[in-house]
Image (cartoon, grey):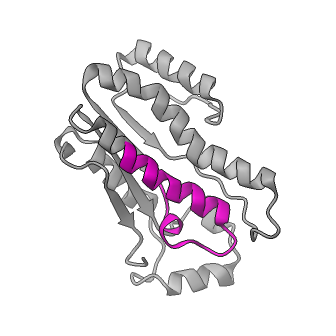
Amino acid sequence: MLFELDITDYNACEALINALEMRFAGVDVLVNNAGITADKTLKRMTSEQWNRVIDTNLTGAFNLTRAALPGMLERGYGRIVSVSSINGHKGQFGQTNYAASKAGLYGFTKSLAQETAGKGITVNTVSPGYLETEMTDAMPPEVLSHIVSEIPLNRLGESYEVARVIEFLANEKSAFITGADYAIDGGQH
């Protein structure tokens, strides 16, 4: 099932989670995977570009997690995985907004993991490097070629490689893993 949602709107997130809770008797796994870019050097970046990226990439994770958390706490079970980025660790020229939003997910994850430790809820992040996606397809070929040359595996990652780690973290048998970040970047960082 697919649902269209503006994750920057807390009320819309809460309404969707409530509808899912009623329909499926709970939301046990939440994957915060929204991400947009609006690349510019900070000198040229507008406040609108900054806010749009922060609101989607970071506030969206808060909105959905905040809406899903009460049900998880009530049931004593939940898995929350947020998709960050290699650039949240290392930064990237022209991406102060994106890097800040993705780095913010680490602090969010570490803190929430402490708040929910012992309550049956795990909270983790995965940090993909450069993957074959629409975002990388839009890059100029010479930029993409340079990026690939810096990846020890000498290739872009595939989405399924990230999905496998998320699947592992979402599994009920991964109950002792919380507050962790998994780099999926071909050894780049």
Residue positioned 52% across, 54% down in the render: 104
Residue 68 placement, left or right of 123: right
Residue at figure coordinates x 19%, y 42% from the top left = 175
Please say if 73 is above or below 147: above
Residue 93 image offset from top left, x and y in percent: 66, 75
User: What secondary structure prevails in the magenta region?
Assistant: helix
Q: Taking 159 as reference, is 40 above or below it?
A: below
Query: Farthest residue in the top direction?
Result: 22
Q: Which residues are magenta?
A: 84-111
Q: Quadrant of residue 2?
A: top right
In-front residue for pair 1/54: 54
Q: In the image, what residue occupies the spot 37% across and 50% down?
A: 110
Toward which corner of the image does residue 165 lie, by quadrant?
bottom left
**Residue drawn at (48%, 73%), measured in percent from left and top?**
156
Closer to us: 89 or 141: 89
Q: Nearer the viewer, residue 157 or 175?
A: 175
> Considering only vertical position in the picture, is 9 above or below 75?
below
